[in-house]
Image (cartoon, rainbow, N blue to C red):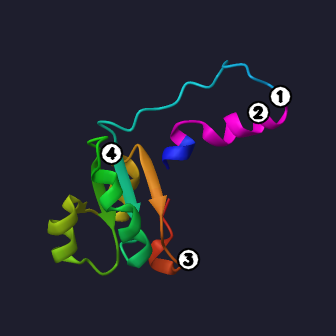
């Protein structure tokens, strides 16, 4: 998430081509943004704590099984999948493809 928000993959590709221009390389600051974590199993929890780091982002999460202890410990709030997609500036997906994770839209 941080790599993409800072355009690191694009910068690396330009570097490989010996292109050192900075046009279009301004990144996006995640401070104050809402990070959506879709799926709070073991993989989602790897991203979850990082989203509350120095960027001071707000985290919302969706999972078919809500873990209230993790919600308190990490500091996110559970919302519906639809609400997560509406509120989030960035979404990190950690879901299997099932009938419950397909958006009705």
Pointer 1: what residue? 18
In the image, 11 versus 28, the foreground residue is 11
Tag nearer the camera, 3 or 4: 4
- Residue 31, placed above or below residue 62: above
Graded by Cα atoms within 10 Å as few (under 14), some (14 to 19) or many (20 or more), the crowding at tag 1 reads few
Residue at horizontal 60 percent and vertical 36 percent from the top: 7
Residue at horizontal 27 percent and vertical 62 percent from the top: 79
In the image, 102 versus 84, the foreground residue is 84
Alpha carbon distance from label 3 to label 4: 23 Å
Graded by Cα atoms within 10 Å as few (under 14), some (14 to 19) or many (20 or more), the crowding at tag 4 reads some
Q: Position of residue 31 (x, y in %)?
A: 32, 36
Q: Compare marks 4 and 2 and give the one earlier in the sequence.
A: 2
Q: Main secondary structure of the magenta part?
A: helix
Graded by Cα atoms within 10 Å as few (under 14), some (14 to 19) or many (20 or more), the crowding at tag 3 reads few
Magenta region: which residues? Answer: 5-17
Q: Is residue 47 left or right of residue 25?
A: left
Find out whether the residues at labels 2 and 3 contact each other: C-beta distance under 8 Å: no
Q: Compare marks 3 and 4 and give the one earlier in the sequence.
A: 4
Pointer 2: what residue? 15
Find out whether the residues at labels 1 and 2 contact each other: C-beta distance under 8 Å: yes
Tag nearer the camera, 1 or 4: 1
Q: Which mark is residue 97?
A: 3
* SS at badge 4: strand
Q: Position of residue 78 (x, y in %)?
A: 24, 65
* SS at badge 2: helix
Pointer 4: what residue? 34
87 part of magenta stretch: no
Alpha carbon distance from label 2 to label 3: 36 Å
Q: Position of residue 26 (x, y in %)?
A: 55, 24
* SS at badge 3: loop
């Amino acid at each position: 998430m941080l790599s993409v928000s800072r355009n690191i993959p694009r910068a690396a590709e330009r570097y490989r081509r010996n292109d050192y221009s900075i046009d279009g390389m301004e990144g996006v600051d995640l401070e104050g943004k809402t990070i959506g974590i879709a799926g709070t199993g073991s993989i989602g929890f790897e991203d979850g704590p990082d989203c509350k780091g120095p960027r001071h982002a707000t985290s919302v999460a969706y999972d078919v099984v809500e873990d209230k202890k993790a919600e308190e410990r990490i500091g996110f709030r559970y919302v519906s999948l639809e609400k997560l997609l509406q509120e989030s500036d960035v979404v990190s997906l950690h879901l299997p493809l099932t009938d419950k994770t397909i958006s009705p839209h």
